[in-house]
Image (cartoon, rainbow, N blue to C red):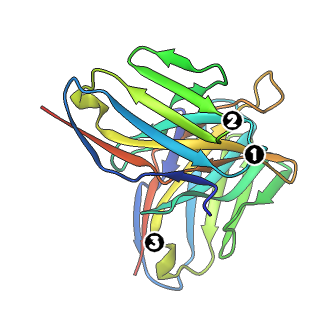
Amino acid sequence: RKEVEQDPGPFNVPEGATVAFNCTYSNSASQSFFWYRQDCRKEPKLLMSVYSSGNEDGRFTAQLNRASQYISLLIRDSKLSDSATYLCVVNTPDTGFQKLVFGTGTRLLVSP
Amino acid sequence: DADVTQTPRNRITKTGKRIMLECSQTKGHDRMYWYRQDPGLGLRLIYYSFDVKDINKGEISDGYSVSRQAQAKFSLSLESAIPNQTALYFCATSDPGTSGGAFYEQFFGPGTRLTVL
């Protein structure tokens, strides 16, 4: 089983739609959770951290369910510029080092 | 100017050649990382360094070596390149912050696209 699993998509949605991505992680000792955004052939960039209480940043809402070991990202009122790959990232202890484990990403395509 | 830079941005080489990828950062971070990204596999950690004297293997270090020349510079070498090392390589940096390192963001360079023929 992969440490972090995501549906690769693509998710094709029209502008203005609401879309949600889920991600599951296998290590119950994981402590920190993130969503990164990666545009085609570019570097990943932090979109938002995910806190236990859930958090919102404009049109983006992230939630964490520790009991079920999944993380979600909700994007409201999708824009063309939201088209990208969204990487679920989990910070997991490993021999004294908190390593980041990256999911393979979920691709989002927003169309006019 | 970018905070994390990588050179070269693109490189095509032949099997058996020695290749060095370089990374420089102006963020003042102690921690630096090398990842490779392959389609369908996500980013995988090759090596990481917490300071100039601390270098550690990641999950896929075989066939690679690194050098931390200074706080700001971290180089990745392929001693004898092979075709399955064709990938997109990213350097990243981080700062443990004030919460003991549990919550921190990694900042990535623009990547080096390496093709080994």
Q: Which mark is nearer the camera, 3 or 1?
A: 1
Q: CA distance from mark 2 to mark 1?
A: 8 Å
Q: Which mark is nearer the camera, 3 or 2?
A: 2
Subunit ID for the residue under disc 3:
B
Q: Relative to B13, is A79 above or below?
A: above
Q: Quadrant of residue A30?
A: top right
Q: Which mark is residue B86?
A: 3
Q: Residue at x 74, y 36 (%)?
A: A31
Q: Quadrant of residue A49?
A: top right
Classify residue B2 as left or right of residue A109.
right
- Which x, y percent locates residue A22? 48, 41
Pointers 2 and 1 within a single chain = yes
Q: Which mark is residue A66?
A: 2
Under circle 1, the secondary element is: loop
Task: Identify which amino acid the numbered label 1 is placed on.
Answer: Ser
Task: Identify which amino acid the numbered label 2 is placed on.
Answer: Arg
Subunit ID for the residue under disc 1:
A
Please report contact status of discs 2 and 1: CB closer than 8 Å, yes or no: yes
First in sequence: mark 2 vs mark 1: 1
- Which x, y percent locates residue A74? 42, 28
Q: CA distance from mark 3 to mark 1?
A: 33 Å
- Which x, y percent locates residue A98? 77, 44
Under circle 3, the secondary element is: loop
Classify residue A49 as left or right of residue B31.
left
Q: Quadrant of the N terminus of chain A?
A: bottom right
Please report contact status of discs 3 and 2: CB closer than 8 Å, yes or no: no
Q: Relative to B28, is B114 above or below?
A: below
Q: Which mark is residue A28?
A: 1
- Which x, y percent locates residue B58? 72, 60
